Image (tube, rainbow, N blue to C red):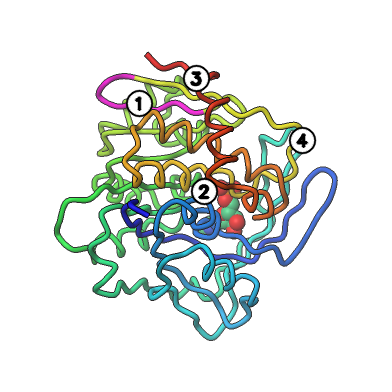
Amino acid sequence: MSAKPILTVGSIAIDWLEVPDGRKGEVIGGSATYFTMSAGRFSPVHVVGVVGSDFPQQGMDIYHEYAANTVDLQTKDGDTFRWGGRYHADWERRTTLYTELGVFESFSPELSTENRACPFVCLGNIQPALQLSVLNQLENRERLVISDTMNLWIETTRDDLLQVLLKTDILLLNENEAHLLTGVREIVDAANQIRSMGPGTVVVKQGSSGATLVDDSGAVHAGVYPIEKIVDPTGAGDSFAGGFVAALANGRSMKSALVAGSATASFCVEGFGTEGILRLTEETLQARMDVVTDKSEFA
Ligand code: AMP
């Protein structure tokens, strides 16, 4: 594989998921899990994270299969991070039922020497203070930093998040988060305001309406792959990030990465938890990227 290595930090979780026509517990999830499964087939992913002693072997197997490096994946005495979420009938709204930090409460990422030099760093959705801790341990060299976030951090730890943004090259966030961060509803205006906070490039994810990338050259929009039936949208954002960053690590253009992100997320929503991403291969991804490209507006 000629792809460059990607260092990622994020949550590793055991989820409880409620969707309009079903519910399921003990589902392996977390932002790092979805990211690693989506990017790991195409680029070497180096994982920074923590699990508790209750983390099932099935979860570890995912990391051993999809991650190239798990040296900085710690196992601590205690409970794995647990999150419960409920989707509403429109699929657009999600209620967090509970968040139990477990071993995340005292997590302090420690980067081994081999992981300090990765040319791509993806700060997945996790407390901004932990994202900063990873950034501060990196070797002083040229790299691309891609960050993800969520409404919780915009509302509760805004100052830390602003510190992360100052060191971020590309920020991924959804439409509601862009509005929450800036107070601006119009997507391109909000993205440009975020660009003045640090990231040169901002990608605004718009669910079933696709995603818009804004940088120095202006705005481009990618459509979505049409899904017959959404089963569970959990992890769609992290899978988008995985597809997007893996494409960049393979030397693809920003536009191609945007299309790859959108196409990758479409696999995720087709199954419960991580089941949908199991169908992601080079061939199936390319086929969906072709469809998404036809539905995109590139100047
Ligand atoms: P997404 O649907 O892309 O927002 O990602 C869903 C995943 O994020 C789930 O598997 C959760 O375990 C994880 N998650 C939910 N809340 C948090 C949080 N506060 N910090 C880190 N990860 C979280």
Residue 84 lies in quadrant: bottom right
Name the residue rendered at 31%, 63% in the picture: 134
Along the polypeptide, which appears first: circle 1 or circle 3?
A: 1
Task: Give the secondary structure at mark 4.
Answer: loop
Q: Secondary structure at mark 3?
A: loop
Part of the protein shown in magenta: 211-218
Mark 3 or mark 4: which comes first in sequence?
4
Q: Is mark 3 within 8 Å of ligand 1?
A: no
Assess mark 2: CB under 8 A from ligand 1? yes
Q: Are marks 2 and 3 in contact (CB under 8 Å)?
A: no
- Label 1: element kind: strand
Residue at horizontal 43%, vertical 28%?
183
Q: Tell me the amino acid under the disc marked 2.
A: Asp
Q: Residues within 10 Å of mark 3 (few under 14, many from 20)?
A: some
Q: CA distance from mark 1 to mark 4?
A: 30 Å
Residue 229 is marked as 4
Tag 3: amino acid = Ser
Q: Is residue 292 above or below residue 76?
A: above
Q: Report x, y in % for residue 260.
A: 48, 36
Image location (x, y in percent) of residue 51: 53, 74
Which quadrant of the rendered structure holds the N terminus?
A: bottom left
Sequence-wise, the earlier of marks 1 and 4 is 1
Please name the residue that numbered disc 2 is placed on: 238
- Left or right: residue 33 compared with residue 115: right
Residue type indicated by callout 1:
Val
